[in-house]
Image (spheres, helix red, strand yellow):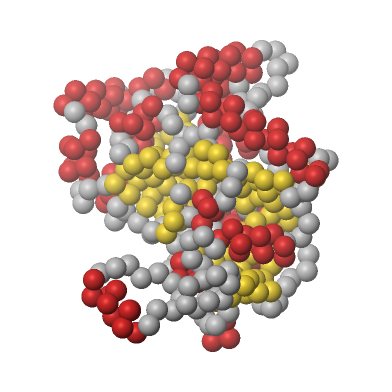
Amino acid sequence: MKTLTKTQKFQSFNSMPAAPSAPKLAEQKQSGELLTGPWRATPEVLLSVHDDLASLASVWKNLEKTGDCTAFQTFAFQSAWATHIGRASGAVPCVVVGWDAEAADEGNGPLFIMPFSLVKSVFGTKLVWMGAGVADYQGPLLAKSFGLSVRRGQFKALWNQILGVLPEHDVVELTSMPTKIGGQANPFMQLDSLNQHASSAHMTRLAPTWDEYYDAKRSSGSKRRDRQKRRKIEEFGAVELIVQRDEASIVETVETLIAQKSVAFARMGVTNMFDKPGMRDFYTALATDAEADGLIEVTQLRVGDAVAAANWGISFKGRFHYVMTSYDQEAVFANRGPGMIQLMALMQNATETGHTEFDFTVGDEGYKGEWCEIETQLFDHVAATTLRGLLIRLPKTSFLKVKRFIKQTPLLWEAFTRLRAVAGNLPGARAVRA
């Protein structure tokens, strides 16, 4: 793929209003009216396209620290995906960087980074977000000044320019996009052909202390049941949450998590994600990456000498992400609630280590309602860019709509999950997707 230099320009609408006069600005400031920019008639964004993530490491890491993004768009996460999952599946990185035309020569950072990849199939080439398949939230990284250079209403025109500099593809398939990126509105919400994702994400804000949070969230009856479960599982040994620090312990715990999760997938009748190329290596490599700077936290819940449960989580900007969790379904204490005990231990640990938010990420499981007061809606954008792309877009859009309808209809979802589990466990049966 050819890497472009910063010469591609996005010219804004010629009908943009001229800059307000100095007296008008003063009047607006005094009245407290919100000022938005840019005020120049033709703001410019320089576009560059890259297939080598290493060349962007410095500016990427700086933008994730100073701008807005989710944990899943950090350089460590995206580069691990490209190295292990993307490469194994034949996905080609296609990262678009936008630079402020007026500040670009002054050495300032980018206005945005959009980490895309190109995926080829017999039906055509798709443009998707890097991280697809493992990233719960997908979208761009945005500088704090993004909204001053690209005003609301301009993004569609900018997007058309971006599509024009990208390599040829047949369909755009961008999924799991939140409505906000950090404190900013997600500009991709301005595109047409948006449909709500099959599931929402859920999060809770933690209190300064675990006791304060726990008291506010749990009724006296719930607390009593929690204590009973704890006492019953302690009959099999001391219960302790262990945060793994050294590489050997991290690798061992990740392998245990994968083994426990694989058993769960088989019982559910769904495809084992760890059988897909690069998946195991991705989770292990990212967890042991010394340059990830504490992004990944691997823990295990021990009951005596047994690993009752394990977790692979992400810590980013004060938010702990409950990403991949498992428990030993074949243990004698499996019915004593090791998964829920681990969850509460993780929430307590997140509180005590300075996190202010605990993100349960994507999924509408009922237990999340016991803890979460914040729901984040996610959206998908699927659009054809060629006639061939229509052959991909139409069935994909229909599939996503049907999937959401089933997941959001409790009776249908319950019936589907039961049928899937039965079918998946029949002799010679092939597992199906969730």
Residue at 68% across, 48% down: 172
Q: Is residue 408 above or below residue 113?
A: above
Residue at 74% across, 50% down: 385
Give the total number of marks visible in the rendering: 0
- The quarter of the picture where the C terminus appears is top right
- The quarter of the picture where the N terminus appears is bottom right
Left or right: residue 353 compared with residue 2: left
- Residue 119 visible here: no
Residue 258 percent across, percent down from the top left = 56, 37
Residue 119 percent across, percent down from the top left = 74, 49
Left or right: residue 85 compared with residue 353: right
Q: Is residue 261 above or below residue 374?
A: above
Residue at 35% across, 22% down: 336
Within the image, what quadrant is residue 36 found in?
A: bottom left
Within the image, what quadrant is residue 110 found in?
A: bottom right
Residue at 46% across, 49% down: 179
Q: Is residue 253 above or below residue 229?
A: below
